[in-house]
């Protein structure tokens, strides 16, 4: 098992990076951008949480407190089901207060569905791979931008539908073989130990 | 000659423990940074075989690679790997220590990856002639 | 006994030039700081991006232009570009000499 892991590690092919290339390398645009964390019971709840005026009182920003006060009051008077109005309020919150809204779920969904690896191997499809390749980079660069991700979600509908859960199932099956093997070895070892102890006690 | 051989034996044991200590310290620091939310991805160092063509005067006979694995949960671009490589190579103190402890190759790759980037450490150190002897 | 042990662990006192160099480097790098790599690598990228915009010589004239050129060149040095504490020093210099604001 350990040898298998070592061999797996050695299946990596490393490209040599020369001194010139290292010195003149451009900084990556999407350096490990993280999605904005937070799960809420709908956009209304998130707006209430993020636009609350007390969020701008430490450090104290009087202008932002005033704008948040306006916005917060409007949120409270808006119906939780009125999606369009809530989205307008969200846009204002982003523009006027610089608030970043949660992208956790959307990013997880898009980064899984648009991963170019999904369309290689047995599931190879030239057009989908091209689309995924184009969208994946954009998803990574906009991990913290809910508006950009929603736009990408529109373009990625085909990929989201085509994403096959069974492929994940296969991977789980492959990984679980190692776990079963370890569990079997541990059970055998405990069994052998129990027999040994019984033998010692009897004799 | 006996003195030299004896010194080599003593150095070998001392270096082995220093190498393991360096890798352990690096991993503890990286884990702490990730857990505290200061780093968006976790780095994990390990010792690998390295590239024999990168050997220098201090290189170990085997296992001269310093490998960093980046845990991000997604595919990594070459630019991102080069960025991490540059961050390590710009730390002159660390590079010197890696070189004298017998490492000659820096390798960086993502998790579940089949592609990575590697650097010849000796090229990135303001070297004295000893490294080329 | 202590002497024998130190003799055993330190070798026989005779060290080649290579071993001497190695000892020197090991002593000098005994307290190598990993935090610039493990803790600050992402922050350094963000700060570098901001400094690149704020310290560009084209934004300044006269004496400030000279200061901006000098700071921009510093920023491009490999040792500073990826080192968060060096970038913070450049940021301070930019605030003082260029009046740049980093809010």
Image: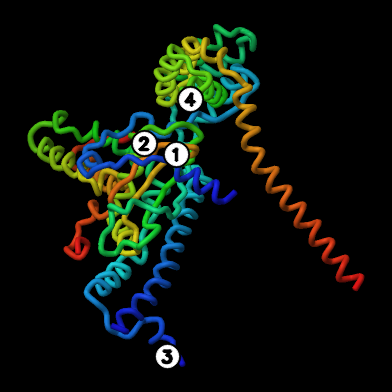
Question: Which residue is denoted by mark 3 in the rendering?
Answer: C4
Q: Residues at badges 2 and 1 in contact (C-beta under 8 Å)?
A: no
Mark-to-mark CA distance, 4 and 1: 14 Å
Q: Which mark is in front, 4 or 3?
A: 4
Q: Tell whether A94 sits left or right of A28.
A: right
Q: Residues at badges 4 and 2 in contact (C-beta under 8 Å)?
A: no
To the question of a shared chain for discs 2 and 3, the answer is no
Q: Mark 3 falls within which chain?
A: C
Mark-to-mark CA distance, 4 and 3: 61 Å
Task: Indicate whether B73 appears above or below A119.
Answer: below
To the question of a shared chain for discs 4 and 1, the answer is no
Q: Residues at badges 2 and 3 in contact (C-beta under 8 Å)?
A: no
Q: Which mark is residue B110?
A: 1
Q: Mark 2 falls within which chain?
A: B
In terms of depth relative to the viewer, which is nearer, C90 or A31? A31
Q: Mark 1 falls within which chain?
A: B
Question: Which residue is denoted by mark 4 in the rendering?
Answer: A117
Question: Which residue is denoted by mark 2 in the rendering?
Answer: B80
Q: Quadrant of residue A176?
A: top right
């Amino acid at each position: 098992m350990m040898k298998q892991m070592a061999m797996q590690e050695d299946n990596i092919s490393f490209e040599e990076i020369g001194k010139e290339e290292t010195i003149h390398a451009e900084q990556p645009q999407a350096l490990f951008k993280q999605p904005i964390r937070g799960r809420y019971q709908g956009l209304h709840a998130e707006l209430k949480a993020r636009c609350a005026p007390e969020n701008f009182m430490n450090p104290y920003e009087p202008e932002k407190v005033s704008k948040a006060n306006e916005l917060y009051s409007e949120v409270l008077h808006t119906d939780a089901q009125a999606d369009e109005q809530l989205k307008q309020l969200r846009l204002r919150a982003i523009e006027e207060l610089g608030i970043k809204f949660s992208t956790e779920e959307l990013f997880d969904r898009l980064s899984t569905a648009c991963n170019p690896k999904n369309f290689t191997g047995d599931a190879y499809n030239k057009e989908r791979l091209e689309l995924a390749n184009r969208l994946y980079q954009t998803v990574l660069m906009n991990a913290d931008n809910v508006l950009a991700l929603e736009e990408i979600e529109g373009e990625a509908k085909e990929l989201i539908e085509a994403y096959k859960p069974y492929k994940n199932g296969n991977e789980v099956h492959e990984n679980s073989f190692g776990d079963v093997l370890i569990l079997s070895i541990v059970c055998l070892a405990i069994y052998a130990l129990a027999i040994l102890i019984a033998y010692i006690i009897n004799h | 000659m006996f003195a030299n051989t004896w010194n080599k034996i003593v150095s070998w044991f001392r270096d082995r423990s220093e190498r393991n200590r360096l890798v352990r310290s690096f991993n503890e620091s990286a884990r702490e940074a990730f857990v505290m939310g200061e780093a968006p991805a976790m780095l994990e160092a390990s010792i690998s075989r390295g590239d024999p063509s990168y050997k220098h005067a201090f290189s170990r006979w085997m296992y001269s690679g310093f490998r960093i694995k980046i845990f991000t949960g997604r595919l990594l671009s070459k630019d991102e790997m080069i960025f991490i490589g540059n961050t390590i190579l710009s730390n002159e103190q660390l590079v010197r220590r890696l070189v004298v402890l017998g490492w000659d190759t820096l390798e960086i790759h993502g998790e579940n990856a089949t592609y990575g980037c590697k650097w010849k450490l000796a090229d990135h150190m303001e070297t004295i002639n000893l490294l080329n002897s | 006994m202590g002497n024998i042990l130190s003799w055993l662990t330190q070798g026989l006192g005779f060290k080649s030039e290579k071993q001497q160099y190695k000892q020197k480097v090991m002593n000098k790098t005994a307290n190598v700081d990993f935090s610039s790599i493990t803790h600050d690598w992402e922050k350094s990228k963000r700060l570098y991006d901001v400094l690149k915009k704020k310290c560009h010589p084209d934004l300044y004239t006269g004496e400030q232009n000279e200061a901006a050129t000098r700071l921009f060149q510093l920023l491009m040095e490999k040792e500073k570009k990826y080192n968060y504490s060096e970038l913070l020093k450049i940021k301070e210099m930019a605030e003082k000499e260029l009046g740049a604001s980093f809010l």
